[in-house]
Amino acid sequence: MSYSRRSTINCENNPNVDCTIEASLSILGGKWKLKIYKVLRAGHPLRFKDIKDRLDPISDKTLTAQLREMEEDSLIIREVFPVVPPKVEYQLTDLGKSLEEIFLALEKWGKTYINQR
Amino acid sequence: MSYSRRSTINCENNPNVDCTIEASLSILGGKWKLKIYKVLRAGHPLRFKDIKDRLDPISDKTLTAQLREMEEDSLIIREVFPVVPPKVEYQLTDLGKSLEEIFLALEKWGKTYINQR
DNA sequence: TTAGTTACTTACCTTATGGTAAGTTATTGT
DNA sequence: ACAATAACTTACCATAAGGTAAGTAACTAA
């Protein structure tokens, strides 16, 4: 899939009727975003390594990129502690937490689907 | 994104805790699936060309591929009428209709997101 | 006779996504 | 002195998703 990531999503000027869906997909699409959400939704802040360990094998590069995008999109907050070795914690913002409904719907549908086949 | 499309999704034998999410994403992921859902959810069967006309510019090749995958995944039914020029109609199955909750959650979140930025 | 129609298929190409492997930093533990 | 650590970055490569453009079938209307 390729969802074009746009810095501005403007539905007023956008003749495209799929704009809200498009907005969601452009932000949540991809292999990792919702999995990262799942890891972070437990609530307490997690370090880079903690997130990495809780996911399927994911490369540092990819995880970094995904976290940066989520930060840009205001889904998570990144807090850097100036220590050695580095310590960086990530947690969901309120906007990030508002993904719960989508998450639950996908999880529920996934179960339904798996049972029906 | 690349979601690996698997013919069998087996959560029992899968140690991966993200399996239901993964199942949903492997079936709904990509640029077009949910947009096609949106077009078809009106209810009445639509022809290939009708679907195409209601989407952002999409190539025949891509639309064909997406529809075939959705058919394989039991989300839609494809009905061929033996006439010339060809007539093929597509409509949602019950399983396809069960995507409504995901669709609404995405649409709602998209609106929220657009308003918050 | 020729153009138009629909639902495709095919060959080819571009772009995006994500992986691998290595290097970087500054400090602590052995 | 040297390895280990966490959170990166960089260069390079592989795969996949999706686009473009052309071709096909069989019939109808002009």
Image: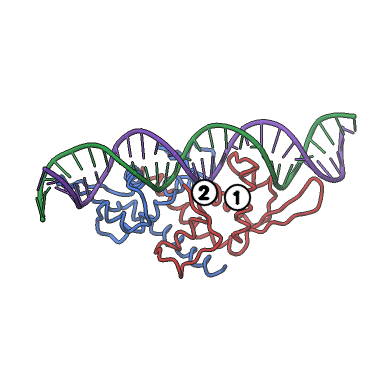
Chain colours: A blue, B red, C green, D purple
Q: Residues within 10 Å of mark 1 (few under 14, many from 20)?
A: some
Mark 2: amino acid: Gly
Q: Horizontally, is A105 left or right of B47 in the view?
A: left
Q: Residue at x 57, y 52 (%)?
A: B38
Dot 1 and dot 2 residues touching (CB under 8 Å): yes
Q: Residue at x 40, y 54 (%)?
A: A34
Q: Which residue is mark 2?
A: B30
Q: CA distance from mark 1 to mark 2?
A: 9 Å
Seen from the viewer's position, the closer of residues A35 and A28 is A35
Q: Horizontally, is B58 left or right of A84 in the view?
A: right
Quarter of the image for residue A43 reads: bottom left
Q: Horizontally, is A49 left or right of A29 in the view?
A: left
Mark 1: amino acid: Gln
Q: Horizontally, is A17 left or right of A93 in the view?
A: right
Disc nearer the start of the sequence (1/2) = 2
Q: Residue at x 61, y 61 (%)?
A: B74
Find numbered disc 2 in the image and state the secondary structure of the residue it sits on: loop
Residue A102's mark? none
* Residue A17 image position (x, y, % from top left): 54, 44
* Same chain? Circles 1 and 2: yes
Find numbered disc 1 in the image and state the secondary structure of the residue it sits on: helix
Q: Vertically, is A105 above or below C28?
A: below
Q: Which residue is mark 1?
A: B66
Q: Residue at x 49, y 66 (%)?
A: B10
